[in-house]
Image (cartoon, helix red, strand yellow):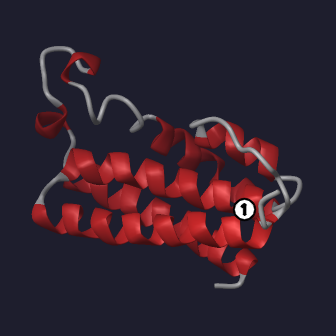
Amino acid sequence: MRDSEAEADRWLRQARNDLDFAQVALREGFFAQACFFSHQIAEKALKALAYHRGDRIVFGHSLSELMVRLSESYPQLSKLGSLAGTLDQYYVPTRYPDALPGSAPFEVYGHVQAEEAVKGAEKVVAIAAGVIGQ
């Protein structure tokens, strides 16, 4: 059986490392990648919270669904519902040219979207860190 605290810590540490990368991507103009990684960061931070509360296995990539499942245990997530929906939109189309009609992701996503995505990911990480005690 997994040690839930150690597993939560592991997921949160990876989320933080990914956040460092997303900030570099934002600064260097890799906006589609910053958007995608922001989704991943939030997903890992939410999964850290799930492991923290004792979940043994955490499935899924939808931030909206993860937040619904976690909101009873962590009511502070309820204020991030619209953020989850926004970041969920960056899971596939930021990576694959065939997900966007006539374009490639690097041609479509811009600084404003990437900056908002990274800031949103920072919020999710901050909540997880506050709960987990990091």
Give the percent coordinates (x, y) of residue 11: 58, 63
Tag 1 secondary structure: helix
Q: Which residue sits at x=13%, y=15%?
A: 102
* Residue at image coords 14%, 28%: 104
Front in this rendered view, residue 14 or 101? 14
* Residue 74: image location, x then y, percent: 81, 62
Locate residue 10 relative to residue 132 in the image: left or right. Answer: left
Q: Quadrant of the C terminus?
A: bottom right
Q: Is residue 23 left or right of residue 8?
A: left
Q: Residue furthest bottom?
A: 134
| Mark 1 Cα-neighbour bin, 10 Å: few <14, some 14–19, many ≥20 | many
Amino acid of disc 1: Leu
The location of residue 131, given as percent across then percent down, is 74, 76
Q: Residue at x 35, y 45 (%)?
A: 36
Location of mark 1 (residue): 49
Q: Residue, x 74% and y 54% (percent of image)?
A: 78
Where is 51 relative to 5, above or below?
Answer: above
Residue 20: x and y in percent read 33, 72
Q: Quadrant of the N terminus?
A: bottom right
